[in-house]
Image (spheres, rainbow, N blue to C red):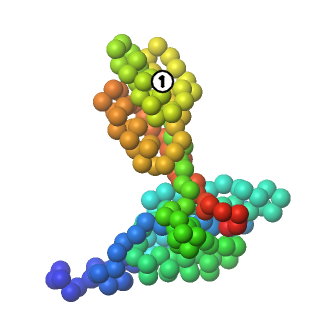
Amino acid sequence: MNAHQQPTGSAYFISPETAKVESHTLSVLVTNEPGVLARVIGLFSGRGYNIESLTVSETEHESHLSRITIVTNGTPTVLEQIKAQLERIVPVHRVVDLTVRAGQLGQERPIEREVALIKVAGTGEGRAEVLRLADAFQAKVVDATVGHFIFEITGKSSKIDQFVAVVKPLGLIEVCRTGIAAMNRGPQGM
């Protein structure tokens, strides 16, 4: 493939090569009904968009509304296309690019948090070191035996990544992450 030829099959290549790829957090309010999540995900996979993180839960029980939080990457043009295409899906009530909204509010990023459960071996001399690191990262012990610990840690994704990296040599067994939950600062809702 020469320098002027663009790959096909992915929307990442529809923007000029000079456009910078950015990470954005989108919040999508949808009717909580069967098949909605599949349609949203189908939009991403069908157009070659990537999802870095995905969370969904019913947030307004009386109205049967769910909030989907998606972290994705793309050029500004691609991100606008994603937002516009999401807005056209029938059970979607609202789409907000929380990253853009944060910028409009004079903030760098929206508030983003993730929860993880992390199982680590805890025997011998390493047991005290694992507990010391957990304390330093404000990870809570939610289960403990003579052979392992399960920690719950909440924070930015980078904090969880760092905790996983420091306990890995001590006997990391398993990691389960929720994905990012996000909202903007200020008195306004979505």
User: Residue at the bottom extreme?
Assistant: 4
Return the residue at label 1.
149
Horizontal and vertical percent position of residue 183: 61, 60
Q: Quadrant of residue 23?
A: bottom left
**Residue 187 place in picture, x, y as percent:** 71, 63
| Residue at (23% x, 85% y) in the render | 5
Instruction: Give residue 121's position: percent from left, percent from top.
Output: 40, 23
Q: Amino acid at mark 1?
A: Phe
Number of marks: 1
**Rendered-image quadrant of the C terminus:** bottom right
Left or right: 182 as drawn, with respect to 48: right
Q: Position of 76 compared to 106: left or right?
A: left
Q: For label 1, count other residues whose C-alpha is less than 10 Å away and answer few (under 14), some (14-19) or many (20+).
A: many
The furthest residue to the left: 2
Quadrant in the picture for the N terminus: bottom left
Write the residue at 56% across / 56% down.
111
